[in-house]
Each structure stands twice: as C-alpha cells, then as structure tokens.
Image (tube, helix red, strand yellow):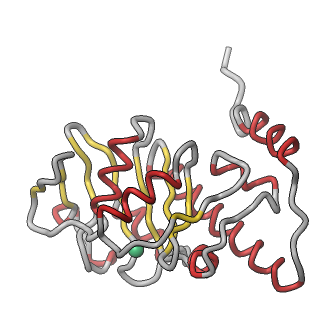
Amino acid sequence: MIATARKMNASGLNQGTSGNLSQRVEDGFLVTPTGMDYDALVPEDLVLMRFDGTHEGRRKPSSEWRFHRDLLAARPEVGAVLHAHSMFCTTLACLRRPIPSFHYMVAVAGGADIRCAPYATFGTEELSRHAVAALEGRKACLLANHGMLALGGDLAGTFKLAVEVETLAAMYWRALQVGEPVLLDAAEMAVVLEKFKTYGQQPEPR
Ligand SMILES: [Zn+2]
C-alpha cells in the first residue's frame, strides 16, 4: 500500500498529501492516514478500519474514509480504492464535464462514459453517496470541483486504471483545445465493452 501511495506521487497522479488509498482486509480495510507525507509512511501508520467506522492504530484515517468504506461495502468485487486530485481529471471535474466516448479506451472504466459526481464537501456522507451513485456499474469517476476515484480488484489494477483514466482526461482536455471531439456512438462502445471482457487475458495454460 505504501509503495502504491508513493507511486501515486512519483507518477504525477497525485500532488502532496491530497490523495488516499484503501485496501480490503479481513473484517475491514486499511486506509492511508490523514495529512501524512507518503515518503514518511511506515506500515504502522496505515489505519485499520471496520465497516462501522471505528478504527485502530496510532494515526487518524484519511478525511475521505467514508467513501472508501461505502465503496468497499457496496461493491464486494472491489479490493482497493484510489482517490487523487490528478491534474487533468480534476481540471475536467472543475468544469463538471464527464468524459464521453471520445476514445474507445473510455470503456476501460466499465461504460460508455466516465461520469462526474455532483459536488459535496470533502469527507461528507453526501459526497460518499454521490460517489457510490456515479460509480454504479463503473470502475472510475470524477468528483465535481475535487478530483477522481478509481476502483479495482487489487492495488496494482486500481493504480493502473487510475493512470489510464488520467491519460484519457489529458487527451480529452487536449482535444477540447482544438474543437469538439467526435464521439463514438453507443453501438460502437457496446462492441468495445464486449471485447474488453476478454481484453488482456492470456489463454489458460494447458
Ligand atoms: Zn480529495
């Protein structure tokens, strides 16, 4: 978890201490502590939380522990949640502009677009509700005037998805500088979504 948190900053996905990460464990989840430099983190700084919101350990959990908890509770297939104020996702989120089907890779987040959740104050239950709704049937979303969220089965997959979504946001933003990007239609996105069900999978060894 600490290695992934550091990778968030090294890759440019995150700035300073604004992002946070969680991973499902037996009887709850681990979440990064609030306001700590990732370079200084040691395993004892990670906060063990239960789904009732109580926590253990020497540090206070991230101020965004609610959406981590609610997403892990609502989505049994999800093992890790990543939140960042990445440059391009956040730029679009400040315009309250979802990412439409301007590129087929948008389907990597599970649908024909990447939604932007309505604004609510950071750390609130309202923001968590908006995030859970925007992520219905999806693995990534933008948070209005705030940042982005990515979900996955494990930390490595979640990190990879977050980088992919940030790259898409950067491409979309660039395309918008020149004009209005041509969007792929629903039928084409349905074809891509179908192909993605087996995309990147190696055949079973015999
Ligand atoms: Zn945030």
Percent position (x, y) of residue 193? Answer: 75, 40
Viewer-nearest residue: 174 or 44? 174
* Residue 30, percent from left and from top: 26, 53
Of residue 79 and residue 6, the one placed in the foreground of this image is: 79
Which residue lies at the image location 54% right of the left edge and 76% below the top edge? Answer: 86
**Residue at left offset 50%, top offset 68%:** 118
Q: Estimate the x, y position of residue 202 in percent, counting from the top left.
A: 70, 31
Q: Is residue 136 left or right of residue 115?
A: left
Residue at the top extreme of this rendering: 206
Q: Quadrant of the C terminus?
A: top right
114 vs 5: above or below: above
204 sits to left or right of 83: right
126 to the left or right of 163: left
Q: Is residue 152 above or below residue 123?
A: above
x and y, in percent, of residue 4 in the image: 42, 62
From the viewer's perspective, is residue 128 above or below residue 154?
A: below
The residue at 68%/47% (across/down) is 111
Residue at image coords 64%, 58%? 114
Please give the count of numbered marks on the rendered protein. Answer: 0
The vertical placement of 52 against 124, above or below, is above
Quarter assignment of residue 59: bottom left
Q: Find residue 164 and report its image quarter.
A: bottom right
